[in-house]
Amino acid sequence: MPDNLAAPASSWWSAGVAATLLTLAIVVVAGQPPAVPGASRMRAVPAIPPATPAPAAPPPAVEPMMLRDMTPDRARAINAEIPFVGGPITAARPFRYAGSEADRSAAQACLASAAWYEAGDDPVGQPAVVQVVLNRVRHPAYPKTVCGVVFQGSERRTGCQFSFTCDGSMARRPSDAAWKRAEDVADKALAGFVDRRVGNATHYHTDWVVPYWSATLDKIGQVGTHLFFRWRGYWGTPAAFRRRYGGQEIVDPRVPGFGAADAIDPAAERMMFGVPAIPSDSVQHLETRPVVTIPGVPAALMKGNIVRLGTPGGNQFALELVIGASDEIYPAIAAALCGERAACMVAGWIDPDRVPARLPIPLPALRSASFVYRRAGDGTPQLRWNCRQIPRADPAQCLPGTSAP
């Protein structure tokens, strides 16, 4: 009771009686009460900890894999100083794939790529890497497809989520035997296998590097030279991993067996993507909304497709394409955006996570495009499709490396 409040005498008397009754109750509980025929002794029931409430704030921002500049020995020393969190590691729920066969094949290939390029031909490390990918698919902070998670940020030269997707590593090709082993690891994970060692980890790195985010997450485990982390607070609890798999997988053409980089004709890429460079001072991010008003482009023509990136009076545009809308409208939108320009490119992506964030559009992003419209210097239009996503009867209309196997 605060010092500046005085209680009446009757309150003091009531308080004294209450204290006496409380003392008697304690004595009875502490002692051995007399046996009651036919009654059983009650057992203490442990308290159930309250569930962690979902925060009102959105999921945390996903930071790119940017490393602090230091020697490997210094990095190992810093990593060793970061303690592991206490308590048991809760295993993730099994991820049992339910979707189309085409999406499953794509998901397996993307998982196998992550396993082999991140962990090498290592049967111990590969399942842990694959588990992190599937954890991310279920977490609302990340794309809701396997390939979307693996290749998130791959349009950047550095700072992608999985470094092998943007540092040139995919120029190396696994042997047939090694690739088969990685595919088997991916197949088991899609069938429900859980690597319990990494729990609900969404991040990892090797012990000879230090990412900028490592000190902000909970360090929960180590597999070989890889350290595994989870978000702190609610977003690292099992309750946060409840999002459903989205389907509509989009495979990067560098994935083995899906238009591998060494199967793409560089001359064909130069011909398809060779648009004059855009001055950096002319880059402008257009406002994103369901229908963007563009001079010369009727709003009804967009039909939900969104211009995410473009230049005022420039010659490159990036579209977010609507799944389910007629793909025959894409050329009309592209032609309207280009207007009378003799040299122009319009690229579109069905997966919004693959739409680039800068101009000129990077080549890795173009390789994953769903649709590309290009006018060469003479104004002649060229139209190409990602035939794995939007099948075409004529293989000549397919983007390099995307024709059906």
Image: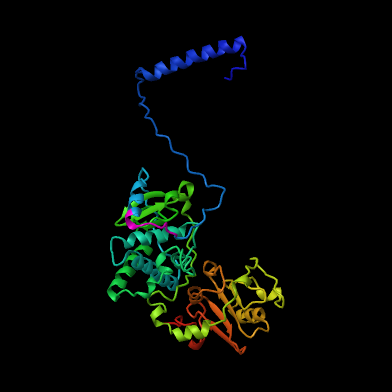
**Image vertical order of residue 372 relative to residue 290, above or below:** below
Q: Quadrant of residue 294?
A: bottom right
Q: Residue 228, image x and y in percent?
A: 37, 54
Between 22 and 194, the residue placed more toward the observer is 194
**Residue 186 inside the magenta-drawn segment:** no
Q: Is residue 304 visible?
A: yes
Q: Residue 13, image x and y in percent?
A: 56, 10
Between 119 and 66, the residue placed more toward the observer is 66
The scheme the figure's colours follow is rainbow
Q: Quadrant of residue 118?
A: bottom left
**Image vertical order of residue 310 relative to residue 72, above or below:** below
Q: Quadrant of residue 334?
A: bottom right
Q: Residue at x 48, y 87 (%)?
A: 395
Between 18 and 343, the residue placed more toward the observer is 343
Chief secondary structure of the magenta portion: loop
- Span highlighted in magenta in the image: 66-73
Q: Number of numbered discs present?
A: 0
**Image vertical order of residue 283 relative to residue 22, above or below:** below
Between 121 and 210, the residue placed more toward the observer is 210
Q: Which quadrant of the rendered structure holds the C terminus? A: bottom left
Q: Residue 343, image x and y in percent?
A: 61, 84
Q: Is residue 305 visible?
A: no
Q: Which quadrant of the rendered structure holds the N terminus? A: top right
Q: Residue 284, image x and y in percent?
A: 63, 69
